[in-house]
Image (cartoon, rainbow, N blue to C red):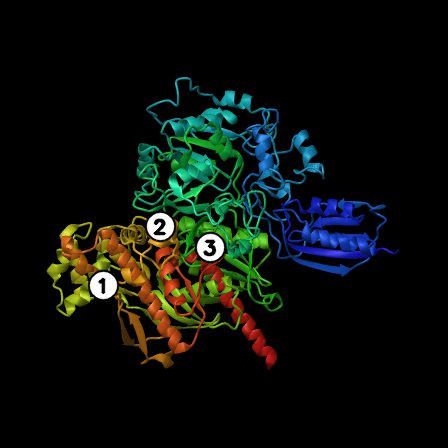
Amino acid sequence: MSEVYKKILIKGVVQGVGFRPFVYRTAIENHISGSVINLGNMVQILAAGSPQNIESFLSDLQTKNPPLSRIDEINISDEKFSGAEFGSNEFLILESAEGESGNSIIPPDTAVCSDCLSDMQSPDNRRYLYPFTVCTNCGPRYTTVKKLPYDRKNTVMNDFPLCSDCLNEYTNVNDRRYHAQPVCCPKCGPIHTFEKSAAAEISKKIDKRETRETAETRKTKETRNTKEIKNTRETVVLSSGTDALKEAAKAIDNGFVVALKGDGGFHLVCDAFNEEAVRLLRDRLKRPAQPFAVMVRTTDVIENHARIRRENKERIHSETFATSETFATSETFATSETLDHLDLLENVRRPIAICNKSDSYALALSVAPKLHNIGIMLPYSAAHYVLFNFLKTDVVVMTSANLPGLPMVIDNDDAFFKLSHIADYFLFHNRTIQNRTDDTVIRFVNNEPIFLRRSRGFVPERIKLPFSAETAETAVSGVGAEMNNTLSFAKDGNIFLSQYIGNTKHLQTAAYHAEAFETLGQLTGIRPEIIACDMHPDFNTTHFAQDYAAANGSALVRVQHHHAHICSVMADNDLPIDSVVLGIALDGVGYGDDQTVWGGEILKCTYAEYERLSSLAPQPMAGGDLATKFPSRLVFGMLYSYIQNETLSEEDLLSLNLYFPRGSEEAKIVLSQLKNNFNVALSSSSGRVLDAAAALLGLCGERTYDGEPAMILESTAYQGVLELTAASDLSEMSFLSDVLGSENLPTLNDLSYFRPTFKQIQENNSKNKENDGAKRTLFDTSALLYSLYLEVIAGENSRFTKNQLAALFIHAFAEGIGRLALKNIEETGIQTVCVSGGVANNDYIVSVLAKTLKENGIVLLTHKNLPPGDGCISHGQVASVTARLIAEKNSKSKH
């Protein structure tokens, strides 16, 4: 029978996942001759065999592929080639070569696998307790790669030549470490050192037997490594290798703070049970209240301190979600209907999962003060497991080592320079971190998992656009907004998102943004012909986009902030290109087309256009951004109309127990600003309304981290709902049902004490001048806050506790948004409703909003693969621009 010849091009996650050895073994099993080669952004296979064998080979390629791989696209063509060079039934793995740009990319970093853990736990294994143990199926990828193709020479592991034993594994096609680029062992791989500042005066030793190594002693111990550790820091090396992790564990157990270098950056670590250690870390980090994430030894320990959602009591994992030994795309992550906390925590992606504190919660109070929940993760790197092997404590604080607003530290010398006043000790290693990557954070909102931060474990995966790849071939990039920023690159119907970047108003973070832009462009092979940015003229990202467009001849497109939010959630739900939705955009700040601050909007949206239908009432912010830091200013601003109509006096407001840094004199100045409209900005922000309520209730007088007042208000409301329990129709509310059970929940009527009210204003400065003079309906948030004010001044005469008032306020706020949406549904006939924005992270608000709409036959669409906050903005920018391009192309083709 004559042979069939095929050329096969495969795009997807096919690098760094053992794909070529899989192809080789599959070819041998099916009696196929030919070759496989990595072409930078895709894999090319030349295959020759009988028709039956070729058919079986092609089937196996698509059904038996490695666990970390993903095939997005496979192109098969007939192409005869010379088989003489291969020999009979010979199949070769060829050396990687540069190729054309495609849609393939390396996989994210994943947790160490059970096989590698077994190696590390076996005293007879040469990798016993070796903290850099990996194989083809696990470990760091994105954080190590410099460029494609993903070969060792293009990663940071090129600094560590393989020893003979590792080389044998690396070149043995039947070994699970075949072409595992990070592979190494104690003979040839990276090494840890445990160090302290030479100038530091530490008040106590780790133990009496602690010894100090001189640099010369350390060199002697490390002669087994081919790369000498360079140390330009003024430190004392206390120990190295496995001893370094053992001594670090002792330091943590004894109440010290250790800066630990991981795969994607440094973490600051201390004993999570030790209140003194946690407070010391807070004081040094100047982070008085922002919650710390914790790393926990095992899931059994987690259940001692947190309430774990168990959708499946028998712990049978959903087939559509990855278990600890398999891998899933973020799309399958989003579509699973049976996820619970353990599905997230035990997954190879190892995100931080936000869990409610349990009644037996016993961690230090300062770990997550004033909040009802806590961020928890399990160990994910080999080094974490070795550290816990030596630790006595079962839970450690594991927080990113960066000063507020600045990028995560990744370099040893830089870490010593920036963290020596924070950390008592340093656990360094000598492997370079090429691409910094923060931990991913996920919580359940309205019973669905959503991202608060999408980073390690998910980046740089592609997310498909719901548009035809053939009509979306133009390369587009979105640079995001300012806070919680990300980048996006798109071509051929695929979007690649960067890791979490942070607050780009800081110059160091803006520089990191530019660096990440270059890295993602290089790894995807995408050079944007169009670059999209926010409408805000003063964002550093806007300036970056303008400069890039000018320097590279790219077109510049500005996308309104909240339109980008809604475009993102539309694409995240695979809505087709001609969709029309009502978008509910709820966040802290976004530059409106009328040059005011928006943040509580009902928009009529397509991917290309939007119209502002309704919003929260614009509120005066005395001092502008100062009001976001000190929300008592917001209370005065929101209630000032009641002074103007003589319902309240200035003395009424001045008598409130509100926090102003300079006391009563500052309070009087704020009133003067409002009276004279001096340095007062208008904002329809939903985040600011929640901040004002938190301040009025005495929960938060100064915002020390992003979202703090609203988060404390939500946690207080959580307790308030528990106090208001009764027979219920709220069994679907995740923030209640996992605690109370469906029989003990309050009814909607029980919580509808405050009644949202609405008013209309005349539109005068709209984007669409044809709308000027039209009426726009507003949610009167001043009236809502005034209702709360009356209860607060009633003091002990109020029938409600502070916790209950928080619950009633949030409930009324969410109900008001729902009623505003229903009014616009009735007027427009649009039945598809989406929500996005940072406030959509609030479980209480989204649960009430979704229930209000559901009772009227409307399903609320929320994010699946992206954060509702500004981490989705770059994605929405790209989705909007791509849709506009397709619409223009289709319009031209019709003519």
Task: Say if mark 3 contacts mark 2, CB within 8 Å.
Answer: no
Q: Earlier in the sequence, mark 3 or mark 1?
A: 3
Q: Amino acid at mark 3?
A: Thr
The answer to whether any part of residue 796 appears in the image is yes
Residue pointed to by mark 1: 638
Q: Earlier in the sequence, mark 3 or mark 2?
A: 3
Task: Say if mark 3 contacts mark 1, CB within 8 Å.
Answer: no
Q: SS of the residue at dot 2?
A: helix
Q: SS of the residue at dot 1?
A: helix
Q: Quadrant of residue 787?
A: bottom left
- Residue neighbourhood size for the residue with mark 3, other residues' Cα within 10 Å, grouped as few (<14), some (14–19), many (≥20): many
Q: Earlier in the sequence, mark 2 or mark 1?
A: 1
- Residue neighbourhood size for the residue with mark 2, other residues' Cα within 10 Å, grouped as few (<14), some (14–19), many (≥20): few
Residue 291 percent across, percent down from the top left: 35, 44
Q: SS of the residue at dot 3?
A: loop
Q: On the rendered image, what quadrant is the N terminus found in?
A: bottom right
Q: On the rendered image, what quadrant is the C terminus found in?
A: bottom right
Using the image, tell me which numbered label, if any, was put on residue 486: 3
Q: Amino acid at mark 2?
A: Leu
Instruction: Determine whether 423 is above or below 802 in the image.
Output: above
- For marks 3 and 2, give the CA distance: 38 Å
Q: Residue at point 52% right, 73% down?
A: 578
- Residue neighbourhood size for the residue with mark 1, other residues' Cα within 10 Å, grouped as few (<14), some (14–19), many (≥20): many
Residue pointed to by mark 2: 740
Q: Residue at point 61% right, 65% down?
A: 469
Q: Amino acid at mark 1?
A: Met
- For marks 3 and 1, give the CA distance: 33 Å
Nearer the observer, 370 or 359: 359
Residue 825 percent across, percent down from the top left: 39, 74
Q: Residue at point 77% right, 46% down?
A: 29
